[in-house]
Amino acid sequence: LRFAGNGLARLDEYSLSDPFLVLYVRGNGTEKYVQHAKTRTLYNDLNPEFPEQFTFELKPNLKYQFKVLVYDADLPDMMLTIKDRYSTLLKANERHLYYKDLIGEAE
């Protein structure tokens, strides 16, 4: 599976949204979705084309449901120096340690 968005909402006051996507999967009658994958953050992008590809091994005769949530990433402290901000962006992108606002979802 590959994912892209078109015309996402602008949730940041001084820049475009910084979207990342979280993919959940629910199999055959289970109640809870399980997080399967997460993309990296694409900065200042309202029409993201996420480069990650997700593959699954699906068992025959089972029904699967997918849920996709797209978030806008926000750093917790926008008063950082440029050097600190860049370092924090790299760390945040690795672990998604920043605040997030839900842009949208699909099931």
Image (cartoon, grey):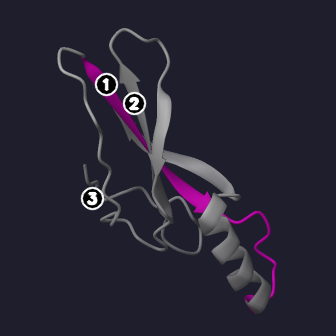
Residue at the farthest left position: 61
Q: Say which element carries label 1.
A: strand
Sort mark 1 into few (<14), some (14-19) or many (20+) by Cα contacts within 10 Å.
few
| Residue at the far top in the pictured view | 29
In the rendered structure, which amino acid carries the disc numbered 2? Val
In the image, what residue occupies the spot 28% across and 36% down? 57
Please tell me whether mark 3 sits on a helix, a strand or a loop.
loop
Q: Distance of mark 3 from mark 2, alpha carbons?
A: 23 Å
| Residue 45, disc | none
Examine the structure image and report whether residue 77 is included in the region drawn in magenta.
Answer: yes
Q: Are marks 1 and 2 in contact (CB under 8 Å)?
A: yes
Q: Which residue is mark 3?
A: 6
At horizontal 45% and vertical 69% (from top left) the residue drawn is 42
Binning the other alpha carbons within 10 Å of mark 3 as few (below 14), some (14 to 19) or many (20 upward) gives few
Say which quadrant the C terminus sits in: top left
- Disc assigned to residue 65: 1
Using the image, determine if residue 28 lies above or below residue 16: above
Image position of 2 (left or right of 76): left
**Hey, what amino acid is under mark 1?**
Gln
- Which residues fall within the magenta stretch? 63-82
Label 1 and label 3: CA atoms lie apart by: 22 Å
Q: CA distance from mark 1 to mark 2?
A: 6 Å
Percent x, y of residue 86: 68, 84
- Where is residue 46? Give x, y as percent: 37, 65
Between discs 1 and 2, the one toward the N terminus: 2
Residue at 18% across, 14% down: 61
Report the disc number at residue 25.
2
Amino acid carrying mark 3 in the image? Asn
Q: Is residue 6 left or right of residue 37?
A: left
**Which mark is nearer the camera, 3 or 2?**
2
> Is 16 displayed left or right of 107 in the figure?
right
